[in-house]
Amino acid sequence: MTAESVEEPTGTSASPPRRLHPAWIVALVALIALIGAAGFRAAPGVLMLPLRDEFGWTTAELSLAVTVNLLLFGLTAPFAAALMQRFGIRAVTVTALLVIGAGAALSVFVATPAQLILTWGVLIGLGTGSMALVFAATITDTWFATRRGLVSGVLTAGSATGQLIFLPVIATSAEQIGWRGASLVIAGGALAVVPLVWIFLRNRPSDLGVGRYGEAAPSAPPAPRPRGNAWSAARLAITTLRDAARTKTFWALAIGFAICGATTNGLIGTHFIPSAHDHGMPTTTAAGLLAVVGVFDIAGTVFSGWLTDRVNPRILLAAYYALRGVSLLFLPSLLSAEVQPSIVVFIVIYGLDWVATVPPTIALCREVFGDRGPLVFGWVFAAHQVGAGIASVLAGIVRDHTGQYTVAWFAAAGLCAVAALVSATIRRHPVADEEAVRSDGAPVAE
């Protein structure tokens, strides 16, 4: 990192330079929090097989718990963004990490699919939903006036980094000490981050008497935190959805991101390991390949963030979805008992593309919806998880009825073509009705 990237841009020549703007410290703590919360994102694909072997549950029953998690993971996000505005980023983040830890720890006592839905699905879904990508969007918009694409890319990569760290550990733990021990590893990872967040994460720049990175420090006293309760936060989230849903841009982003979720968390994230196992590949080997996806996802997402600051985000989204669709067309013919060079190529390409869609999507939400960009992105992300949840359970049903995942992979490839087309047609500039949700949601005269 160069000196330029850490020095605070000054508003006047008389302002003394600050060697490290507090925004970078907040971003670092947020990155570590995202890593700590990412443990469960790596868990279902690894733990589904041990649970199926121990309890005799079907793939569809296990996928249902994952589906509930994915749906709540998305639907919680816009409300979490509103709660962060009302009660502060730190309080919401700490609560989310505690809920994730509780859900993972309590899962060791499950004996029925319903109990698995409660722990894996409800508790961890609510917790991870509050630590979803909307958290990265909120940090970026609150603390940065410049370098937003790069920062959102780095924070988005935090989930991939967490997957990279936890996936081999969870796979090895499940193999050596059982799936219950692996669940406790996830709980420990989430809880270990809580003290760091509580001490170092700040809600907004004015708490420290500075401006956002890239703008002058505020000359006026910091504004008081918005008053309200959980209901007012929920009402803000709902009215934002109501207003955004009147625009074509919102639906284009939501459709594309729903397909993004279906082809990442819903399919590859949940079913790649069981599918590879169907072809004779050991679980630990398949988990290692999925971890490699995390490695390249870091590079791909950070680079996507850098590109988003320089290239039309609509072009980026269309290219990403098209590349993903082509990759999925070849997947059924690449899986085998051993790791071949062709599957490695797929893993590299899919890794670079995994959540590269996030920085340009956040940028478009900010461009079109202004100050409400993070809240709108929360709803777009909810669509992402709805797509993931539907894909997860449908792929499980396909596997139970056909004995393989081929139909699911081909269907996902077709959906990616739809996402590429929809993304390419997003309007270049917001139109009159889109201006209605740029700030406070009040209608704007046309």
Image (cartoon, grey):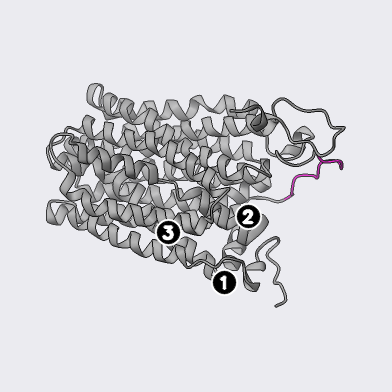
Rounded to the nearest whole Å, what is the CA distance between mark 2 and mark 1?
A: 23 Å
Which of marks 1 and 2 precedes in the sequence? 2
Q: For the N terminus, give its image quadrant.
A: top right
Dot 2 alpha-carbon crowd within 10 angstroms: few under 14, some 14 to 19, many 20 or more: few
- Does label 1 or label 3 sit earlier along the sequence? 1
Kind of residue at badge 3: Ala
- Residue range highlighted in magenta: 217-227
The image position of residue 425, as x and y in percent, is 47, 68
Mark 1 and mark 3 residues within 8 Å of each other at the beta carbon = no
Secondary structure state at the residue bearing disc 1: loop
| Residue that numbered label 2 is attached to | 231
Horizontally, residue 216 falls left or right of residue 354, namely right
From the top left corner, tell me how far across and down residue 385 is, in percent.
41, 53
The residue tagged 3 is: 318
x 55%, y 28%: residue: 194
* Image side of residue 283 versus residue 325, left or right: left
Residue type pointed to by label 2: Trp
